[in-house]
């Protein structure tokens, strides 16, 4: 499982305040804690104020990148912010989050992805928003895959997010997501999947219980990457156990390593 660590996101109050203060040490500690907890990428989102995002994202990249060994995931819908941040980015690998199946987003972002040989997250949504059936979502997935093919971007660089809609608004949304998740690699070999879990529980009580259960189910349906908080030991315990049960953890070494580190709290 590829873990994209979600904590450095300017929608969080603590992150927003630290960004306003340009508290570099705060962000270094956040990044290092997430790397130590098992993250493969550090997601970096500076996007609460459009007028500041270009400068803020660039500053975050410069502040964090040399403090960790792992690459960053640049999380922005602002193409100028992405371009500016990538001019100072110094690691071999980078992920960009994200683009949609809308023609203008494809034309704006995929040249940047191609230029920097980046991994990229594609969202299964288009002009009409998020479709309410597996079939309609798969039509948008087809658009995303064809787009990366047209730009000669390897399919292995594409991570499709089938998009999570809260079950509190429609009880069938979890099932719809999981069926789409399973269909993507079956239909398009080489393409990988990713999601942010927490939206599934929006508006529900005891959200962490739902999120943890949903992660286990998603791993069972073949999820390749998750945008999560790696400092949530109970969530990570579910991840390690689920990967071991699905035969995705050779000799159960990740599970055993986590156990020896005291991370598998019941």
Image (cartoon, helix red, strand yellow):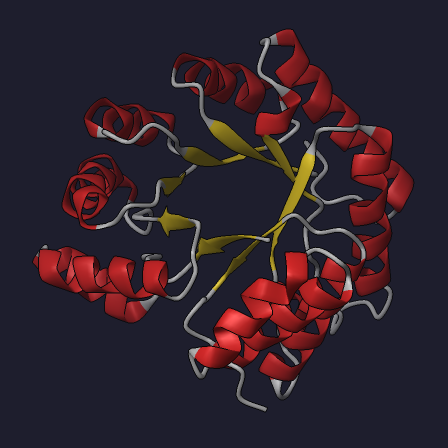
Task: Tell me: 248 left or right of 29.
Answer: right
Tell me the residue at 70%/55% (across/down): 248
- Pick the residue in front: 125 or 260: 260
From this viewpoint, which residue is outermost toward the bottom? 266
Q: Looking at the rendering, which quadrant does residue 87 occupy?
A: top left
- Pick the residue in front: 29 or 180: 29
Task: Tell me: 110 left or right of 231.
Answer: right
Q: Looking at the rendering, which quadrant does residue 183 occupy?
A: top right
235 is higher (above) or lower (below) than 9: below
121 is higher (above) or lower (below) than 116: below
User: Whole-percent x and y of residue 55?
Assistant: 17, 37
- Pick the residue in front: 187 or 263: 263
From this viewpoint, which residue is outermost toward the front? 251
User: Whole-percent x and y of residue 215?
Assistant: 67, 66
Tell me the residue at 34%/66% (across/down): 12
Tell me the residue at 16%/41% (across/down): 59
| Image quadrant occupied by the C terminus | bottom right
Q: How many marks overall?
A: 0
55 is higher (above) or lower (below) than 178: above
The answer, for residue 13, to whether it is visible in the render is yes
Tell me the residue at 67%/13% (across/down): 149
The answer, for residue 137, to whether it is visible in the render is no
User: Whole-percent x and y of residue 100?
Assistant: 61, 32
User: Whole-percent x and y of residue 90?
Assistant: 23, 29
- Pick the residue in front: 262 or 210: 262
Task: Tell me: 136 left or right of 168.
Answer: right
């Amino acid at each position: 499982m590829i873990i994209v660590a979600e904590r450095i996101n300017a929608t969080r109050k603590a992150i927003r305040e630290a960004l306003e203060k340009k508290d570099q040490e705060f962000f270094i500690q956040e990044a290092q804690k997430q790397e130590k907890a098992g993250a493969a990428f550090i997601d970096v989102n500076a996007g609460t104020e459009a007028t500041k995002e270009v400068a803020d994202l660039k500053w975050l990249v410069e502040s964090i990148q040399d403090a960790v060994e792992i690459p960053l995931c640049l999380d922005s819908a602002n193409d100028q912010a992405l371009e500016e941040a990538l001019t100072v980015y110094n690691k071999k690998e980078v992920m960009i989050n994200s683009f949609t199946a809308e023609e203008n987003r494809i034309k704006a972002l995929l040249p940047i992805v191609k230029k920097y040989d980046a991994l990229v997250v594609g969202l299964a949504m288009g002009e009409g928003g998020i479709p309410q059936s597996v079939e309609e979502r798969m039509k948008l997935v087809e658009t995303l895959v064809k787009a990366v093919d047209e730009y000669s971007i390897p399919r292995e660089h594409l991570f499709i997010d089938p998009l999570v809609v809260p079950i509190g608004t429609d009880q069938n949304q979890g099932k719809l997501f999981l069926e789409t998740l399973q269909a993507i690699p079956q239909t398009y070999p080489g393409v990988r999947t990713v999601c942010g879990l927490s939206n599934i529980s929006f508006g529900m009580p005891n959200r962490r219980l739902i999120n943890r259960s949903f992660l286990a189910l998603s791993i069972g349906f073949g999820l390749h990457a998750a945008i999560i908080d790696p400092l949530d030991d109970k969530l990570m315990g579910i991840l390690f156990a689920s990967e071991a049960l699905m035969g995705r953890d050779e000799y159960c070494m990740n599970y055993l390593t986590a156990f020896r580190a005291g991370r598998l709290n019941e």
